Image: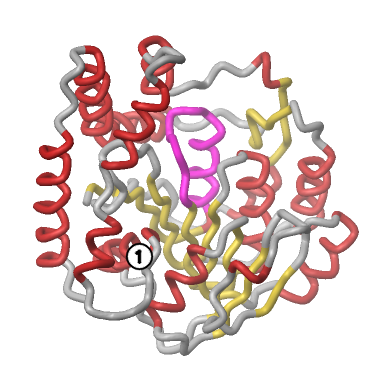
Amino acid sequence: MTYYTLPKLFKYNNTNIIDLMNLTSLHKTMIHDDSFLEQMLNTFISKTNTSLYDEIKTMHSFTDLLNIKIPDEIYHPKTYFAFIEINKISKIFEKQHIVSLHMSNTHDYLDALFQLRKGKDRYIYMSEKNDISNSTIPSYIGYEQLNSSNTSSINRVISKYNNTIDLICINYDDIKDIIKNLLLAIVFQKESGNLIIKIKRLNNYITKEIIYILMSLYDNVLIIKPKIVNSVNEYKYIVAEKKKTNNLNLNIIRKLIYQLSKLPNDTYPVRILQIELPQILVNKIDECELIMSENTLSTHMKILNSIHLNNVNLRGIDNKNEKESRIWLKENII
């Protein structure tokens, strides 16, 4: 596991950060924020070897091996193992009773926390998809459904859930969904509550703004890449610990949520603050991204090289997964 604790920029809370929010968006053709990894893959992967590349990439995961080795009859999603690693650093899952909100189009976070906490909490699930099937959620999970995909329901859910949630987990790929749900999350979150956001890359400016906002409102912010997130995956977890205040400008938050909801499908937010970020923070986040991406880039280069030389070592991948699963179980007692 790799993790990075960001420096404290504020002695006290910085709630006026909400007043400095302003949405800037661009058409997707005007946005060029591919990571170095994506640029490299677009250059070296041809149509003829895409399927082989994808097949090999999926083999670099030992989640299934862990499920085989753990002596129970429940399938554990990858997030379950990630949460175990995260808890070793931040201890955010150890409260006596947790009211949790899971903002995602999949149920993995919900399932993972339910298994980790043995179902002794209150669970709330919210999706951006109106047509998501609840039948995909395991029947053993008792939860409440929250729907805020309709703009007209925003005021209602803000009124109902304001300052009520201990732990919030956000899991979206679309930056519009991430920001919209983050804005709702900081309203719903109790003082001293904790927040987790799964995010793909840190190098684009709007992600740095998200981190700056969290540093303004929470006592501590970490970026964690658990070992279970395999070496071909760019995803990290931003963990914000102990929200410091609930004195927020709800009018600005409502306005931004409405603007995000009205953005055309081909238009994306590129800025949410009307100030420039401190250069020290930009440098620290870039450094963190570089360190966490080094192993990922190396693994992708090995895959591409093996395809190019027609020398894919499947046995070597299997042996590596077996070794990593043994080490993981030794380091993380379940």
Residue 251 location, x and y as percent? Answer: 81, 54
Task: Depth check: give the residue in front, 188 or 333.
Answer: 333
Task: Tell me if residue 180 comes above or below residue 333 in the rendering.
Answer: above
- Position of 136 with respect to 114 (left or right) is right
Q: Position of 253 compared to 208: left or right? A: right
- Specify the segment rendered in magenta: 198-216
Q: Horizontal and vertical percent for residue 234?
A: 37, 37
Residue under circle 1? Answer: 83
| 139 horizontally vs 134: left or right | left
Judged from the image, the secondary structure of the residue bearing numbered disc 1 is helix
Q: Main secondary structure of the magenta part?
A: helix
Above or below for 190 versus 108: below
The answer to whether residue 131 shows anywhere in this view is yes
Q: Nearer the viewer, residue 50 or 166?
A: 50
User: Which coloring applies here?
Assistant: secondary structure
Could you say which is closer to the camera, residue 181 or residue 120?
Answer: 120
- Which quadrant does the C terminus fall into? bottom left
Q: Position of residue 316 (x, y in %)?
A: 11, 38
* Residue 288 visible (yes or no): no
Q: Quadrant of residue 86?
A: bottom left
